[in-house]
Amino acid sequence: MQTWLTNCLILVILCAFTTVGLSQSTSSKDSLQVTQDSADVDPVIVYWSKNNTVGININEVAFVNWSAGGNNSISSLFHGEFERNYKKKLTSWKNYLSVRYGLNAQEGQSLRKSDDRLHFKTTFGYRSDSTDNWYYSANLDFKSQFTNGYKYPNTENAISKFMAPGYLLIGIGTQFSHPSRDLNAYISPVTEKSTFVLDQRLANEGAFGVEPAEYDDDGNLLKEGGKVRTEFGFLVTSDIKQQVFPNIILNSQISLYSDYLNDFGNIDIDWQVGLDMKVNDFVKANIGSHLLYDNDTKYKEDVNGDGDLETLGPRVQWKQFLGIGFTYVF
């Protein structure tokens, strides 16, 4: 019951945030109109640009006397992307925030989480010449989730939580930014990656690559597991947004990381690719996939049916999604 209330509260907060954002957008437009109508005001050079996209997808299936059978279900997904970018002569500063949260309710089952993601990235760049597309850059990248994750139908022991895991990458390197296309590539030979598992139970299990707890032969705890794992390695990222057909835009974000100190050459992969298809100004469809691989993230499954999850080796993680819903860009 507590988990159900938490999930509903998250959706209410996100929807309220969306409503406030829309009202602020309308106010901004009104202010801009007043400025344009004032002939005496000198033109102002704007160095900041913004892009906000919020939306909600809802899918519902209902059966009444359906001879083929089936379960009634309803699912919803809130998603938002926010950008704040600054560019002035030799300086560039890009900020990106992405949030996703989804719930699924199916007849005969408890309310379940279907998606949960929090991602913030900021990149500061400086170039030596105004015609150069390469920048000396510093980058910060943070990823986590909002609420507990479970291996359903078991909802007693969470397998993930907020900041369990949480990933923070900080580094310096060089960035390529195409002047006319929405393309950015970042290369950093000096990047620190910190993996946070702030839940002590998960940390004791050695989840997500942190140091597990130590026990004696009788099972008594000798030393608690570490909550932070630090790596030092090489990072390459690429973001591209390209119109491939009328009203269809391709988005791709990929991150490749390899640790110098542990198994150099073993690459952590985080790759998202999607197609945004515009029906009209407010209704859009999107299809995409999210692929993950981290050698430190072990797959868990109840292989012998005893109710306990056994820890297996690392696996390729893949998620596919298709949604149609209301989207607002401002």
Image: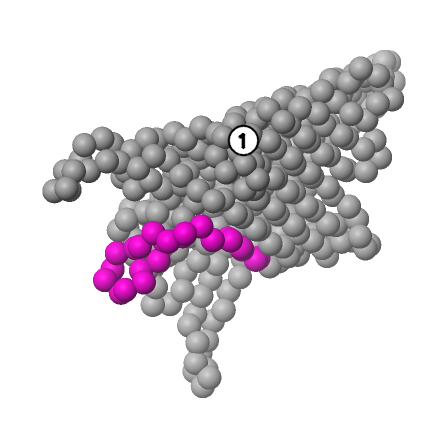
Left or right of residue 92: residue 162:
left
Q: Tell me if mark 1 has few (under 14), some (14-19) or many (20+) residues whose alpha carbon lies within 10 angstroms of its own.
A: some
Image position, residue 227 (x, y; %)? 34, 31
Image position, residue 329 (x, y; %)? 68, 41
Image position, residue 57 (x, y; %)? 56, 54
Residue at 71% of width from left, 20% of height from top? 136
Image position, residue 163 (x, y; %)? 40, 35
Residue at 45% of width from left, 86% of height from top? 67
Left or right of residue 62: residue 41:
right
**Image quadrant where residue 36 sits:** top right
> Which contiguous range is marked in magenta?
299-321
Q: Which quadrant of the figure contains the C terminus?
A: top right
Left or right of residue 199: residue 167:
right
For the residue pair 212 and 323, the one nearer the viewer reads as: 212
For the residue labelled by badge 1, is the local secondary structure a helix, a strand or a loop?
loop
Say what amino acid the circle numbered 1 marks. Answer: Tyr
The answer to whether 134 is drawn above or below residue 255 in the figure is: above
User: Is residue 182 at all visible to an observer of this figure?
Assistant: yes
Magenta region includes residue 261:
no
